[in-house]
Image (cartoon, coloured by chain):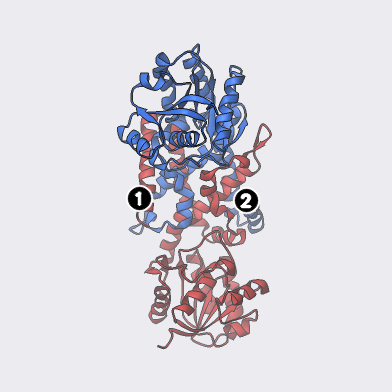
Chain colours: A red, B blue
């Protein structure tokens, strides 16, 4: 069977890029995978774990001969990364990414790749606080959503090929406008990260009668703040790139919090119970559904 | 070996009460354990799972002959529960509780139990979103903190006996003033619960282009909001009982959140990265420590 792509280059062999490389190889979707990155240690780990066929830190080697380039570095670095790879990429090279923000990013990639080849924005919902080639695994995307965000400029054939790649590694692929993606992810991912970072920040410096607050963190605190252990560089980029949608999500959250706070301050036991029970039911339904 | 308590009555055989019953029996700390509660089904489950020696829904039977009574129902119910048990309790009966709030609660229990016997406030840090006798397990407290909150009125011998009980089931026991407990727990537990409930509340009703926001909840959202699946009755009581300390904790959290939000709005990439990295380091240290 002819592979979907003769050669795929993954720029950034971390949790997502490394997992895609391993999964695409295992599924026979690619003839060869080249891992491109800055960290020699991470590239060595990617080879050692057999995530990729070979690695390079040279953009010319990375881009030459690639039929598909997947940008899998932190969101803020992707525009410059595309510019660096572009001179070495053959005409028609398909460019895609796995960034957690799509609107401004896809527009920037389309501009950077203009006249070089098609661009398809993609975002597999499979991130975690784990990072690096050491955290990658070939089954990471099985059953997970992958959102493709075509624009007016997206080539339908390129879109279909990227869809086939993600479907081939087990993801549930769907399409929506970049702005819709950013509004959804602001609420389900970017806002929770910001809250977790703020919660840890507030607790980290605090003490009560000489006792460090964080010494009393139990299971609930650990769950609630787990994602605050995520890489700062990654999340700085995401928060900055999706600032407008994040601000909207924050406003909605603040309204919900202020409502609960008011019920507590007023001692409104009945309405407070109803509000908590409604939230608890909505939260439990998420466990049932997966 | 003579047990520490000839008979212990546990009022509320849920996650905490049921686990304490099972653990104390297994460790030989108690001669017999009586489970007292409202729900016949939960009491039957407690018997079936061999958490207790016998059960009753009669306060007279529950209190008569008990050397120690442990209140393990939702915080808001404990004052009335003590009043109901009091007429049937022998002079000298030791009263303790496992409530997540201590200041107002311990004062209320001391008033309710005045002239009947000693009162010792306690709080094992072992709660979760799980509930009921079905979730109880004898090893729940092993390695967990248990905070005792003596007051000026606390009898030293009674305090030492309750300490021995919790140490005997594996907890790391310490003492502090009720107000210190409430200030710490507001920050490590009550605030995170309130935030999780607010986050689910904000997301539950929201849609983007006809897509329900919660359909896009991935691992990060699930972790961050897991505790919002907790029983509303329990958390209504806790939030109301600790409202002043919770308001202080909320103010600190809001300041931390506003700072991060300002850095995002200003596009202050450097300071934002530093703030996120500091939080991430503090959060990761919590995993290393346990």
Q: Is residue B184 above or below residue B205?
A: above
Say the numbered circle drawn on residue B155.
none
Q: Are discs 2 and 1 less than 8 Å apart at CB? A: no
The residue at which mark 1 appears reads as A285
Residue situated in front as seen by the camera: B270 or B155: B155
Chain letter belonging to callout 2? B
Q: Is residue B249 above or below residue B201?
A: above
Chain letter belonging to callout 1? A
Dot 2 alpha-carbon crowd within 10 angstroms: few under 14, some 14 to 19, many 20 or more: many
Q: Position of residue B88 (x, y in %)?
A: 40, 15
Q: On the picture, is B18 further left or further right than B167?
A: left
Residue situated in front as seen by the camera: B70 or B230: B70
Residue sticking out furthest to the top: B115
Q: Residue at x 61, y 30 (%)?
A: B180
Q: Position of residue B164 (x, y in %)?
A: 58, 29
Q: Which of the two discs, 2 and 1, sits closer to the camera?
A: 1
The residue at which mark 2 appears reads as B279
Quarter-wise, where is residue B144 in the image? top right
Residue sticking out furthest to the right: A210
């Amino acid at each position: 069977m002819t592979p979907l792509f003769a050669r795929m280059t993954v720029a950034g062999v971390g949790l997502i890029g490394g997992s895609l490389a391993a999964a695409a190889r295992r599924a026979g979707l690619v003839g060869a995978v080249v891992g491109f990155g800055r960290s020699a240690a991470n590239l060595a780990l990617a080879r050692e774990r057999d995530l990729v066929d070979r690695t390079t830190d040279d953009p010319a080697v990375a881009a030459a001969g690639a039929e598909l380039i997947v940008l899998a570095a932190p969101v803020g670095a992707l525009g410059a990364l595309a510019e660096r790879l572009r001179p070495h990429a053959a005409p028609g090279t398909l460019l895609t990414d796995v960034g957690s923000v799509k609107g401004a990013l896809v527009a920037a990639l389309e501009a950077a790749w203009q006249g070089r080849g098609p661009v398809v924005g993609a975002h597999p919902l499979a991130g975690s606080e784990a990072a690096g080639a050491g955290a990658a695994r070939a089954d990471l995307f099985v059953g997970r959503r992958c959102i493709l965000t075509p624009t007016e400029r997206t080539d339908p054939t390129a879109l279909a090929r990227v869809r086939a790649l993600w479907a081939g590694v087990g993801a549930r692929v769907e399409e929506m406008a970049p702005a819709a993606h950013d509004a959804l992810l602001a609420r389900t991912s970017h806002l929770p990260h910001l809250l977790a970072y703020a919660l840890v920040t507030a607790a980290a410096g605090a003490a009560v009668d000489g006792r460090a607050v964080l010494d009393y963190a139990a299971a609930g605190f650990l769950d609630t703040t787990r994602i605050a252990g995520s890489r700062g560089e990654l999340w700085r980029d995401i928060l900055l790139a999706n600032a407008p949608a994040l601000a909207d999500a924050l406003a909605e959250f603040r309204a919900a919090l202020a409502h609960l706070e008011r019920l507590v301050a007023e001692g409104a036991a009945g309405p407070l119970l109803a509000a908590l029970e409604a939230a608890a039911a909505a939260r439990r339904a998420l466990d049932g559904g997966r």
